[in-house]
Amino acid sequence: MPVPVRYVVRPRSRQISLRMDSARREAVAVLPRARDRKRADALIADKQSWLDQHWQKLPPPMPFVPNGRIMLRGRDIELRHEAGRGTAREADNAFIVPCPDIANFAGRTHRALIAVARQTITARAQHHAAALDTTFSAITVRDTASRWGSCSINGRLNFSWRLICAPDFVLNYVCAHEVAHLLEHNHSPRFWAQVAKRVDDVKTPKHWLRDNSPTLFAIGAEH
Ligand SMILES: [Zn+2]
């Protein structure tokens, strides 16, 4: 299929530019003015093979379909549809999603994964916060495109639901990292000393995220 392109008009940019957004799985064309659209299309046509190359390097999509496979807690598991209502649940090598209407399976699966992520991340953040003798004011778990986690100056924690798809040591590290920001709103040695109280090995989870983020963003992708 052709590489999807998102057009963004940004008056402060000086020229038309094109880049690949592997998180959103689309190309982004930045235009100084809306009327540059035609010239942008010419640039896209010109760079087609470059775009195709980048597109083919993206991991295959893992759409939320019955019997589809996704990564959950770092493991390859199957999505299973169950007739009727009820709460989605994890089973051996499967995530079971009750859904009366199969047309809603993708949406239900997405919401159920966010709920599982919220539960796991909240428990882990509370655990780290208690151990570091601090508290947070609120926690949000949603789809974030640019950051796995963040901590606001007023003590609100924010996480990507996709962390539930990563292995536990990765989720654990991101939770410890953001909780440590409740004490140190910077990346100073004092901050890393707080993180080190909770996580022995910081490099391995960091590298895992760097190497596997396109895979995490392929989960639930339609194309
Ligand atoms: Zn940080």
Image (cartoon, rainbow, N blue to C red):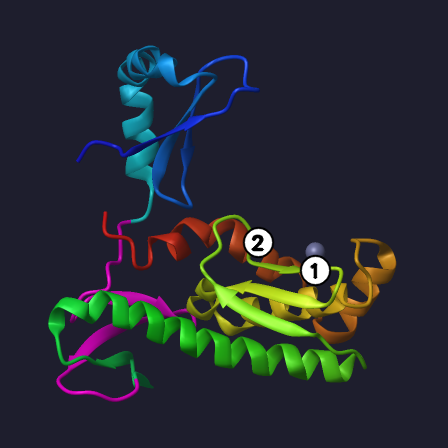
Judged left or right of residue 93, residue 185 is right
Residue 132 in percent (x, y) is at 79, 78
Question: Who is closer to the viewer here, 53 or 44?
Answer: 44
Q: Mark 2 points at which residue?
A: 207
Give the magenta range. 60-87
Q: Residue at x 28, y 21 (%)?
A: 49
Where residue 144 appears, x then y in whole percent? 49, 55
Residue 49 highlighted magenta (yes or no): no
Ligand 1 shown in quarter: bottom right
The residue type indicated by label 1 comes to Ser
Label 1 CB, ligand 1: below 8 Å?
no
Q: Which residue is drawn at 60% across and 79% down?
A: 124
Q: In the image, is residue 150 above or below residue 75? A: above
Residue at 31% over, 18% down: 44
Q: Is residue 216 visible?
A: yes
Find residue 137 and report its horizontal and vertical position in percent: 69, 74
**Residue 119 vs residue 36: left or right?**
right
Number of other residues with Cα within 10 Å of mark 2, as a class: few under 14, some 14 to 19, many 20 or more: few
User: Dot 1, how many residues are within 10 Å of its Cα: few (below 14), some (14-19), or many (20+)?
Assistant: some
Please name whichever residue, 140 or 196, is drawn nearer the observer in this view of the structure. Answer: 140
Q: Is residue 201 visible?
A: no
Of the numbered discs in the image, which one, if any, rests on residue 152?
Answer: 1
Left or right, residue 178 beside residue 16: right
Mark 2 belongs to which amino acid?
Answer: His
**Residue 71 in magenta stretch:** yes
